[in-house]
Image: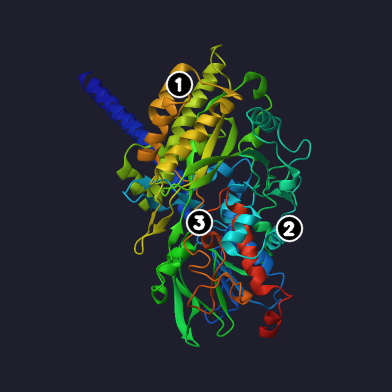
Amino acid sequence: KNNYLLSHCQTQRRRSRGYNTQGRVDNNLRCSILIITLFIIMFYPLFRTKEAMPPIDPDEEFDLIVVGSGNGACGFLGECLKHVPADYRVLVLEEGDNFFFTSDITHQAGWSKSYANGSAFTLHNAVTPTGRSVLAGRARTLGGGGSINYTMIHESSEWLVKQAGRDVAYWDKCKEELNASLKRPDPLAKGYQTPFADFIAENAQKAGYAAPNKDDMIQNIPSVNESENKKRLYYFPTQFDMFGSRTNSGVSLVKWEQIKYRWNTTVTGLVMGTMNESNYCNGVQTRSKESGANVTYKVKKDTGRVVLCGGSQSPRLLLNTEELAGNEKIGQRVNDHICMPLALYVVKKDKASVVGATDNYESLFAEVVVESKTDEGDATTTNVTIDFFSGDVLRLIYLISSLYLCYVPFNGFKRLMGRFPIIFTYLSNTLRMILTAIISLIQVLGRLIPFLPREIKITTALVKFNASKEGYYERSGSRIVLRFFDDERDSAIAEEAINQNLAFLESYGTKPPFIIRKLFQLVTKIPYRQGRQVRRYVRNFARKTLLSEQHLAGGCVFGDVVDKGLEDSNKTGQVFGTSNLYVADLSILPLPRVSTQMTAYLMGHHVAKQLYSAKKSSWKKNN
C-alpha cells in the first residue's frame, strides 16, 4: 500500500508540474504573439513590400529632370507636357511614396490621417530666433499638399503682379487655363455646400461677413478679392467626386505615362559644371530610401534642364550647392502662416443630424482684414483667414491628436520632434489611440446611462495669418528660422481677430460641459470668452505653443534668386548664375495671404508656359 501510494503521489506531482509548465508555455506564447502583432502594426510601413520601379539605364540622359512631384511640379508638368514632342525624356524624383501607397489618405474620408502617416507627412526642423520650437510640417507624396488638404483659392492677380511681374490680364489668363484643367463645379450652385456649411455661412453673414461672390471666380475657383470690404466669405470647390475620391487634384493634371518616375528617392545634391562661362547642372545625385543605393541621373548636354519643384527643399538644395554660395539671398524671405486652433464646440442638437463626413473640412472660409502699424509708424493690413472643421469626434481625431501636440509644454522635446520627425508620428498615433479609447468608452456607456451622449459631434476652427517678419534658412544644417511673434503686431493681430469672431464661432455650436471645458483650457489656454482669456491664450501661444499651417514659402524669391523672365521669357524661374537650373514652386514667391495650394500650381504652370509654350519661336528653334 505504501509503495502504491508513494507511486501514485509521484505520478500526480509529475502531471501537475507538466500541466503548469504547459500553462506557462501557453502564456508565453500568447504574449509573444501579442508583441509580434503590435510590432508588425507599428513598423509595417517601414518594411512593407514596395512596388518595383522600372529600371533606368545608368547612361540614359534626360531632356528634363524635375525634383519633387508636389503642387508646383504638377502645375509645371501639366503645362510642359502639352508642348513637348513625344520622345522628350522626362524624369521626376519624389522623396515620398508612390501615390498608390498613400491613396487611402487622399480620399475625402481619410485626409486627416496624413498627419499620422510618417511617409506622407513630416516635420521641418523649425525654430524661432530664440530657439523655441515651431511645429511646422510638409507633405512628401505624389501631388504634395494637394493630395492631403484641399482649400482651392488663388492669390489675387494684383498681388501676383507685384511679386512676379507681368499684368493682371496675364495672371487671369493663367488662372483660367489652370482652373479649366481641374474641371471643378460651381461651389455657389444650390446644393453643392453641405447643410451645415450653409448654416455656418448664414451665421457669418449675420456677423458682418460679405456673402461669397460669383465675380471672385474664374472657372469656378475663387481668387482673393482686393475690395475695401474687410470681412468676406469664400466658397471653394473640393477636389472630390460624389464618392469622396480625389479625382481632380494636381495629380490629375499630369499624363504620368509620358514620364519616368522615381519615388522613395532623396535628392542629395546637384552635379554642377561649367558651360559658356556659366554654371551648368549636369545632373542630380540621389539616394534610394529602400536600398540605400546612390545614383546620379544626368541631363543632356547643351539642351537638358533641371527644375526644382521640391517646395521647402528647393532652397536647401541651392544652399548646399557650392557654386551658388555667393548669392546670400538664397534661403531668405521665408515665411509660413501662424496657425492658432480655436475652441471646440458641441454641434447643436437640431443640427447634429445634418453633420456628416463631408463636413470634416468645410469647403468655405472667412477672411477678415486687420489693420496695424509697422515699427516705422506706417499703416499696414494683414489678411486673417478662418477654416472650419465639423463632424463626429472620432473622424476628427487624427487632426486633433496631431495639431494639438503643439501644446506639449517641453520646448526641448518639441525641438527633438523637429530633428527626428518619427517621434512626432508615434506620439501622434499614441495620443490618438488613447483619445479613441476614452471617447469610445463614453459612447458605449451612453447606451446605458441616459445623460451620456451616444455620439459626439463637434465643430471647431483655425485662425491663420502671415507672420509680420520673414524668416530664413540657416546656411548649414537643417534648421529653418521662422520669426513667429518676433514682432508685437503678431500678438495684436491674433487678439483682434479672435475677439472679433468668438461670438460668431459660438453661434453654430454650444460650449462643452464646464468640467471638460476647464480641463481643455488647463492644457491649451484656448479662450471661450473675449478679453482676458484671449490675451492669456495669445501670450501663452507666442511663448510656448507655436504652430504653423504647413504652408512654407520663399527662399528662392523672384528677383533675388531666380529671374522673373521679363526681358527674356526663356529665363523665367532660372537660378541666377546658372544656364539650365530653374525653380518652379512656391519658394519663388513670398508667402501668399491665403492657403497656398492653387498659387503653387500656378507658379509651376507659369514657369512651364514661359519655357515651353508652343507659340514661342525660340522653343521651336532650339528643338
Q: Amino acid at mark 3?
A: Ala
Label 1, label 3: how far apart the Cα atoms are: 38 Å
- Name the residue rendered at 70%, 52% in the picture: 248
User: Viewed as shown, does residue 81 lie left or right of 301?
Assistant: right
Q: Secondary structure at mark 3?
A: loop
Name the quadrant containing residue 38.
Answer: top left
First in sequence: mark 2 vs mark 3:
2
Of residues 268 and 617, the one nearer the viewer is 617
Residue 553 marker: 3
- Name the residue rendered at 27%, 26% in the picture: 13
- Name the residue rendered at 66%, 53% in the picture: 249
Q: Amino acid at mark 2?
A: Glu
Q: Secondary structure at mark 1?
A: helix
Name the residue at the bottom extreme. Answer: 276
Which residue was labeled with disc 2? 176
User: Viewed as shown, does residue 154 lie left or right of 306?
Assistant: right
